[in-house]
Image (cartoon, helix red, strand yellow):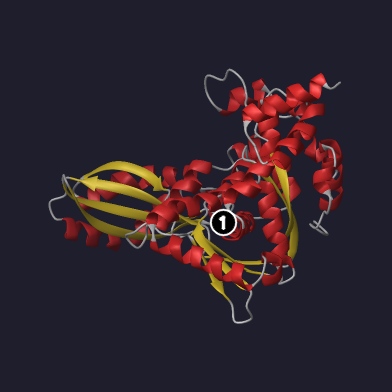
Amino acid sequence: MVVNSRLSGLRDREPADRRRLVAESAGIDEDVLAPLEPADGLTVAQADHLIENVIGVIGIPVGVATNFTIDDRDYLIPMATEEPSVVAAASNAARMARGHGGFRTSTTGTVMIAQIQVVDVVDPEGARARILEAREELLAMANAQDPVLVSLGGGAIDVSVRVLATATGAHVVAHLHVDVRDAMGANAVNTMAEAVAPRVSEISGGRALLRILSNKADLRITRARAVFDAELLGGAEVVRDIAHASAFATADPYRAATHNKGIMNGITAVVLATGNDTRAVESGAHSHAVRDGRYSALSRFEVGADGHLVGTLELPLAVGLVGGATRAHPVAQAAVKLLGVQTATELAAVIAAVGLAQNLAALRALAAEGIQRGHMALHARTIAASAGARSDEIGQVAQRIVADGRIRIEHAQAVLEELRSAR
């Protein structure tokens, strides 16, 4: 268990030294993080067992977000992303919440939905009633497919049915609600849907067509909240302006799209690092953003009674710790061990907290200084590398182009040429 996620000066160390310090702070053996070294990470042979037609692997930087306290526990959080400023911004936002207890989370549970679409039904409303009457029979059929899940306290727990008007007529859509526990759940719910579909067809008098899970995981909601310190944010005016920016995103779908992208910068990075399905989580998040019929912000920021900033976030998070790449990918295994999470619910809580922190960091940058100043300063090292700087030259070039206020590749090339000529 992480004793203290407040690792000051981590950015000033070399990667190998960071790994040592992070492992020590997380209470794990340093060898656990060995797969984060490319030479010891995912091999082509291992990749060949994960997907088809493998020709190689691609590397994404994995950083560690610090300063996070979530539900009274400290975490060091692995984040896989290619975008500069994301890890630093999340860590800084978490620091601003730390003095007020960090992040608090809650969840609606770990229930996923499998859909069975039935077409060519003569009496759709009658079919809906008949399917609901067969609830216990259908649940028993579904649970017979996965006795292990049932033994762990999960399994199919309910059936609901909708009559849906479509361009090809009325469709009867049966929903099988399945508690998937610590799995993401796709395989479990799909198997159950396949098993009960013939019986649903028979009961309805129609033809079962699609049988598949829904990524609109609105029975698997995770919420996070935090209080961010007004003084650390930059004062009362910055707090008010962040609240105004949040209101803008809530009201305007054009702004909401970019606002939510900032949230997903953090969420997707942790989902990817832990070997979970980034596309499923992203589609679930964006479907939730339009749940009221208009695309809106997933988060809200308000000025609290004491003048501090109160942030809240709610979204579906279908993530797991069993099955898939989470168990097969050595880097994902290392990331999960570093986190020390024990359940899918705990993992979702961590991910939601990171999303809220990431969002706050972006809003503060916009409200206080403009997004380019902070983002481009951190982007300077990438610009320097793109200009052809070697590892021993990147720091000097980056520092110079930031000081000059010209963080562009052509200026980096000129600075690099100047440095080399001076030697």
Indicate left or right for 405 with 208 as reference: right
Q: Is residue 339 visible?
A: yes
Name the residue: 39% across, 59% down. 252
Question: Farthest bottom residue?
Answer: 305
Viewer-proximal residue among 389 and 118: 389
How many neighbours does mark 1 have within 10 angstroms: few (below 14), some (14-19), or many (20 or more)?
some
If the image is split into quadrants, where does the C terminus sit?
top right
Q: Which residue corresponds to mark 1?
A: 366
Which residue is painted at 64% across and 58% down in the image? 346
* Left-right relation of 38 to 206: right
Residue 377 x %, y %: 68, 43
Q: Compared with residue 411, is residue 378 higher up or lower down, i.e. above or below?
A: below
At label 1, the amino acid type is Leu
Q: Quadrant of residue 130?
A: bottom left
User: What count of labels does the image hold?
Assistant: 1
> Looking at the image, is 370 positioned above or below residue 278?
below
